[in-house]
Image (cartoon, helix red, strand yellow):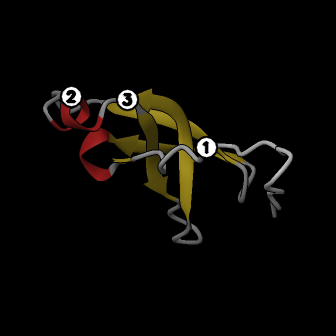
Amino acid sequence: MGTVMIKCPQTGREIPTGYEADPKRFRSTPVFFGRSYCPICQIEHEWFAQDAWVCDPGPVRSRRTRSSSVLSVHP
């Protein structure tokens, strides 16, 4: 699952729509109309699914723990 993203029509910046979807299924979904609040403009933007995309989540980082022989430093 990834976050459905659109471009803010005022700034051109990418913003999340608040929806999550499987990228493959989202691409095969019939066209629909949506509205999402823009944290940049602080207004609701209207958008069509054909103008949106799914941002795949990055790889999950494994978290190392401290052991007697190794000390991990996390940024």
Q: Residues within 10 Å of mark 1 (few under 14, many from 20)?
A: few
Which of the two marks, 1 or 3, is nearer to us in this view?
Answer: 1
At horizontal 72% and vertical 59% (from top left) the residue drawn is: 40
Give yes or no for contact between labels 2 and 3 (Cβ–Cβ under 8 Å): yes
Q: Which mark is residue 41?
A: none
Q: Residues within 10 Å of mark 3 (few under 14, many from 20)?
A: some
At horizontal 46% and vertical 29% (from top left) the residue drawn is: 20
Cα separation, mark 1 vs mark 3, equals 24 Å
Residue 52, horizontal then vertical, whole percent:
34, 48
Query: In what element is the residue under mark 3?
Result: strand
Image quarter of residue 37: top right
**Callout 1 amino acid:** Ser
- According to the image, label 3 marks what residue? 21
- Left or right: where does residue 64 sit relative to residue 54? right
Q: Is residue 42 above or below residue 1?
A: below
Where's the C terminus, which quadrant? bottom right
Marks 2 and 1, the one that precedes in the sequence:
2
**Callout 2 amino acid:** Arg
At horizontal 59% and vertical 71% (from top left) the residue drawn is: 11
Residue 72, horizontal then vertical, whole percent:
80, 57
Where's the N terminus, which quadrant? top left
Image quarter of residue 65: top right
Residue 29, horizontal then vertical, whole percent:
18, 28
Cα separation, mark 2 vs mark 3, equals 7 Å
Give yes or no for contact between labels 2 and 1 (Cβ–Cβ under 8 Å): no
- According to the image, label 2 marks what residue? 25
- Left or right: where does residue 18 sit relative to residue 68? left
- According to the image, label 1 marks what residue? 62
